[in-house]
Image (cartoon, coloured by chain):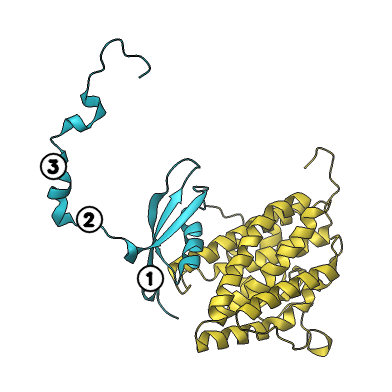
Chain colours: A cyan, B yellow
Amino acid sequence: MSSSTDWPLWEVFVRSRRGLSHTHAGSLHAPDAEMALRNARDLYTRRNEGVSIWVVPSSAITASSPDEKDPFFASAADKPYRHPTFYEIPEGVKHL
Amino acid sequence: MNDAPVTAPPRAAALALGDDALVLSHRLGEWAGHAPVLEEEVALANIALDLLGQARILLSLVGDEDELAYLREERAFRNLQLVEQPNGDFAQTIARQLYFSTYQLFLYRQLAAGDSAFTGLAAKAVKEVAYHQDHAAHWTLRLGDGTAESHERMARACGALWRYTGEMFEPVEGLEVDWRALEDSWRESVAGVLERATLTLPDGPRSGAWRAGAGRQGLHTEPFGPMLAEMQHLHRSHPGASW
């Protein structure tokens, strides 16, 4: 028997309710996409957590590198005006 | 279910279906800690738990579920000989799953469409069983149409268990089922899966002198005794133990 390390790794995304986005739930090993879906069903939705599942080969995901954290994210930290809460709502504005 | 009092379920039928589910549940539970991969262990345990749930409902229709499960002698069990067969290699477990879950699927579909003491239970169980059949079919395809070794093992397993399949279509007293139609649907479905898996439906004897199967009459095969001993020893050693 092959061990699970011979099987590719899959990332599992579960949509918990209609109208919500798929959210990352975890990962698992499976020989192919169809079996990955079934394993995901058993591992992540057996307590009625989902209405839809995506599985994606982990190798297909390109992730941002921790080394690039500062240029990627830190420069947004001192720009509070990018948040809507930065602005005061003038008196008299309705329907907001 | 309506409010009208349902007629008492036929005892023999509830025992037969309940024992099938209980015994197969225990066999699948034996994979815990031994399955080839963690993900598959969870899948088999899930199926085992579905079956245990069915067994509890069915045996409760007959009497005290714990007494029935843990204090009956081998000869008092009414399960098919197919479900008591040992797990063997993974292919044998999958072949057993394919044969049995396909049988249960078409049987419960008929019961769910009918009007008997089993209608409500069957309607609920049929969704679980459809998944069990799907799981078995997908693995049959991968093993049959996989490597030379997996193909050979799957073919061997399907052949080895074939002689236990005839028993499934013997009428059970108290079940209003078209057994002929059940066998036709079963054969068509299993043959279709095997064909897609590059395997062939075994054509060995399912009747006559070589035919196995008197589980419904309480006659069981040699591996059943040791399985029962393991399943029952805790309850028998510590009556009423709970946790």
Q: CA distance from mark 3 to mark 1?
A: 36 Å
Q: Is residue A75 left or right of residue B190?
A: left
Give the residue displayed 85% in from the left and 71% down from the top. B180
Give the residue displayed 68% in from the left and 75% down from the top. B192
Say if B199 sits above or below A42 in the image: below
Q: Is residue B119 left or right of residue B240?
A: right
Q: Earlier in the sequence, mark 3 or mark 1?
A: 1
Residue B64 visible, this orientation = no
Graded by Cα atoms within 10 Å as few (under 14), some (14 to 19) or many (20 or more), the crowding at tag 1 reads some
- Of tags 3 and 1, the one toward the viewer is 3
Q: CA distance from mark 3 to mark 2?
A: 15 Å
Q: Earlier in the sequence, mark 3 or mark 2?
A: 2
Please tell me if label 3 and label 2 are on a single chain: yes
Say if B48 sits above or below A45 in the image: below
Residue with the mark numbered 3? A75
Mark 2: which secondary structure?
loop
Mark 1: which secondary structure?
loop
Residue with the mark numbered 1? A8
Q: Position of residue A45 (x, y in %)?
A: 50, 52
